């Protein structure tokens, strides 16, 4: 259950990134604050979606913060509002992607990256560690106690609110 909750939250983040980017590119204003200054002016949403797809690919990825930052800097002045938020949260978002990949892929590479993340966060790799057990673990030094699941989701939510202030 914990793994599925995390996976759904991460997928929601991906959808949010794509939809907010496309809507801003198409001229949508945020509920509060100023809209980003665009370099491009697509005539409709479909065109905006086509423009963000890298050459030679059939889709635009929304999981790697550095790739999204580069894309934002091509379409928006100073990459705003995406670049600064993604740079400020890149480490956390990269960790979240490692956890997402450990849930979604059963490859040795995904598992190795996940185990290295656990060692970094906990100082050791507890025996029989699963993604779910890690996510249920309390983040060291938090008061009141906060699980890694709660920490990642609240940080993702905070980043989203910086991109689209409500």
Image (cartoon, rainbow, N blue to C red):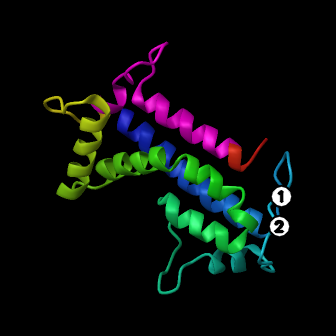
Name the residue carrying label 1: 35
Evaluate if marks 2 and 1 touch, with contact meaning CB atoms under 8 Å apart: yes
- Examine the image and state in which quarter residue 51 appears: bottom right
- Examine the image and state in which quarter residue 107 appears: bottom left
Which numbered disc covers residue 27? 2
Q: Which residues are magenta?
A: 133-161
Picture residue at 51% right of the left edge, 62% below the top: 66
Question: Where the C terminus falls, by quadrant?
Answer: top right
Q: Main secondary structure of the magenta part?
A: helix
Question: Where the N terminus falls, by quadrant?
Answer: top left
Tell me if residue 1 can be seen: no
Q: Which secondary structure lies at badge 2?
A: loop
Confirm whether the magenta stretch covers residue 158.
yes
The tag earlier along the polypeptide, 2 or 1, is 2
Q: Which secondary structure lies at badge 1?
A: loop
109, 141: nearer the viewer: 141
Picture residue at 20% right of the left edge, 33% below the top: 129
Q: Is residue 49 above or below residue 160?
A: below
Which residue lies most toward the top here? 144
Picture residue at 39% right of the left edge, 40% below the top: 4
Left or right position of 117 against 149: left
Q: CA distance from mark 2 to mark 1?
A: 8 Å
56, 74: nearer the viewer: 74
Left or right position of 152 against 137: right
Q: Is residue 158 above or below residue 26?
A: above
Picture residue at 62% right of the left edge, 75% below the top: 52
């Amino acid at each position: 259950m914990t793994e599925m909750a995390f996976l759904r939250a991460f997928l929601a983040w991906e959808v949010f990134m794509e939809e907010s980017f496309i809507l801003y590119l198409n001229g949508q204003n945020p509920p509060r604050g100023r809209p980003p200054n665009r370099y491009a002016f697509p005539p409709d949403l479909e065109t905006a979606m086509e423009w963000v797809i890298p050459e030679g690919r059939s889709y635009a990825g929304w999981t790697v913060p550095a790739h999204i930052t580069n894309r934002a800097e091509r379409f928006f002045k100073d990459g705003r509002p995406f670049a600064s938020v993604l740079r400020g949260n890149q480490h956390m978002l990269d960790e979240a992607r490692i956890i997402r990949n450990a849930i979604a892929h059963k490859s040795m590479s995904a598992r190795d990256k996940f185990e290295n993340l656990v060692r970094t966060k906990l100082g050791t790799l507890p025996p029989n560690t699963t993604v779910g057990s890690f996510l249920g673990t309390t983040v060291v030094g938090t008061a009141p106690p906060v699980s890694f699941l709660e920490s990642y989701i609240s940080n993702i939510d905070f980043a989203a609110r910086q991109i689209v202030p409500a």
